[in-house]
Amino acid sequence: MDLQFTGSAIEYFRIWIVNVCLTLVTLGIFSAWAKVRKKRYFYSHTRLDGTPFQYLGMPIPILKGRLIAAILFAVWYISTHYVTTLVPFVILIALVLAPWVAVRAAAFNTRYSAYRNMTFSFAGTYLSAAKVMYGWAIITLLTLGMGYSWWHQRMKRYMVNQTSYGGIAGDFSATGGQFFKTYLIAGLLFIGAVVGAGMLVGFGAAFAGKANRPVFTVMVLVVMYAAYVMVFAYTQTRIANLTWNHTQLGPLHFNSTLEVRGLLGLYLTNALGILASVGLLIPWATIRTLKYRADRFSVQANGDLKEFEGSDDSSVRAVGAEVGDIFDFDMSI
């Protein structure tokens, strides 16, 4: 079963420009309605086996969650910029809240995502999330960062295994060693780019003279930024493929075939288009990205889909999801 995204840049531009204008006019209040309008458009134009997904979230709970998230962000900003003596206490509170944010955000996003009139669900708890999040974080610190790959793998496994659809939980089989290989290659690529940039500036300083040194400095910055984009595209591609290709949901197996070259070209052309249009091509870039990812994704069914049954329809508060958004905290699959 192929995944299809049928949205168009022109249609989404109309939604996007209205969202931006009304959010500015209402001083951010309309942002909750804007999020619902955007997600409903994306979900309804994402089809699996010809059937669209559904987004069931409502604006008012999202708005309440955003107000609480804004208050927490204000506390963080004031403490880090004006009342620095409170920073240790704010960090401690943030560490206590982080597992709750991850769990509640996942619960909200899954509860209000549906396919064929059945919603997804997330069964994770605060304690179980804290054990994975901080247990492996301690190991990462003790190994001077070497354990990060295993921490990331454990977090992905936790999120997948706690997510279910129709009463069937996901299963994640990728290993920490596979994550480590991805990050090792990404690190070697970046080191190679840094060494190359260092050699470039060295030769420039030795043979070009003082007058041309600023030119070579700019060249080094360009090379460094290009290296970052390349490594970012490589990591995003490999981790996404690794995650989905080792995720199973009952009889469903997923296949992601993102390519580094394709994603890198997408990032670069999107960035150039957005810069050249002073931001007006953001909807175009968004639609291109979603279509590319959908075209590189498929689902294989190795059994009867009737084994999926109705799932829990209880409500979930939006606070965790909005706190995660405002602090750019993402632990999703």
Image (cartoon, grey):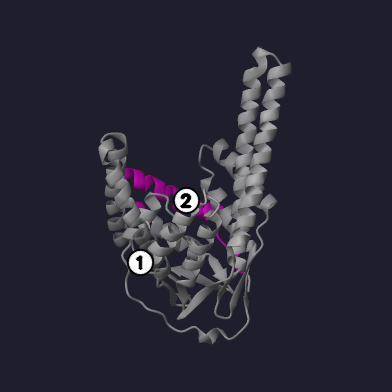
Q: Which residue is mark 2?
A: 141
When asked about the image quadrant of residue 180, the answer is: bottom right
Image point (54%, 44%), residue name: 281
When asked about the image quadrant of residue 256, the answer is: bottom right
Q: Is residue 4 above or below residue 309?
A: above
The disc labelled 2 sits on which kind of residue? Leu
Residue 121 visible in the snapshot: yes
Q: Which quadrant is home to the N terminus?
A: bottom right
SS at circle 1: helix
In this picture, which residue range is highlighted in magenta? 3-32
Q: Residues within 10 Å of mark 1 (few under 14, many from 20)?
A: few
Q: Is residue 3 above or below residue 168?
A: above
Nearer-the-camera pick, 214 or 25: 214
Residue 127: give its label.
1
Nearer-the-camera pick, 241 or 142: 142
Q: Is residue 18 magenta?
A: yes
Q: Quick one: label 2 or label 1, which is nearer the N terminus?
A: 1
Nearer-the-camera pick, 195 or 305: 195
Q: Is residue 133 above or below residue 87?
A: below
